[in-house]
Image (tube, helix red, strand yellow):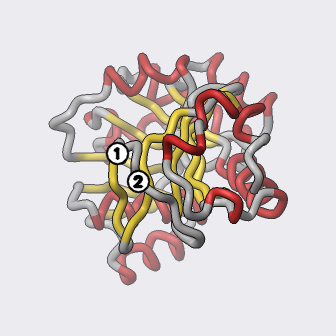
Amino acid sequence: MNLSSLGFFRSLRKDNQQFAVIGLGRFGRSVCSTLHNFGYEVLATDIDEKRVSEALTEGIVGHALQLDSTEPGALKEAGIFEFDTVIVAIGNYVQESIITTLNVKEAGVPHVVAKASSEVHRKLLRRVGADHVVFPEYEAGCALARTLTKPAILDRFDLDPDNSIVEVIVPDEFHGKTITELQLRNRYGLNLLAVSQDGKFQINPDSTKRLERGSAMVVIGCNKDINRLPI
């Protein structure tokens, strides 16, 4: 997530319990399944009747319909325009994705999230009104590359292109040293947010806390400084 996304996420209704997902490919199915498991009501649609049937059989949605989302009349009849948030998960079919996004925005849906497959696709989706665009494949590829080159980084949250919060395995040379002795801020320009102990994280640990090999720590700072850690 970046700062430009903050306005969109602030505008989402906290009491919204219903979502519509258009497209039941891998991405759409994942969104449906997660929302459904969280207890939200999900209406899913796809042009492929087999995908609709599978989604219902597997119980990843409460309701699913077969329809052509490029037809505004079909979307209206299905009640899609009544939803506060619609996820256009078509992605790989650029023309259908753009037309569908245009249809739901022109109908007045307040929050439309759309999946893009390229930078050009993203620009077109924004042009026709998508409020938030995601790149699942790009983001997964970046995460994999980071994992392969920096296996000690267990998790990462990018604040912006230059700054992140990361969970890392405690480096061997940090083993047995207290937080005061490490001087992370002076030596690396990083702030320590938490350290793990017995499978749980201790937030804002005491400066006398000694780090242990094999445990994890969470730091925040500039990516260039994070890359200087001995991991």
Quadrant of the rendering where the N terminus is positioned: top right
* Marks 1,2: beta carbons within 8 A: yes
Residue toward you, 23 or 182: 182
Q: Is residue 79 above or below residue 188?
A: below
In the rendering, at what x and y percent does residue 135 appear? 67, 43
Q: Which residue is labeled 2 in the image?
A: 209
Q: Is residue 87 above or below residue 211?
A: above
Residue toward you, 155 or 50: 155
Q: Amino acid at mark 2?
A: Lys
Relative horizontal placement of residue 69, taking residue 153 as reference (left or right): left
In the rendering, at what x and y percent does residue 123 appear? 72, 22
Q: Amino acid at mark 1?
A: Asp
How packed is label 1: few (under 14 Cα within 10 Å), some, or many (20 or more)? few
Residue at point 30%, 56% (across, down): 42
Q: Which residue is labeled 1 in the image?
A: 206
How packed is label 2: few (under 14 Cα within 10 Å), some, or many (20 or more)? some
In the rendering, at what x and y percent does residue 21 appear? 43, 50
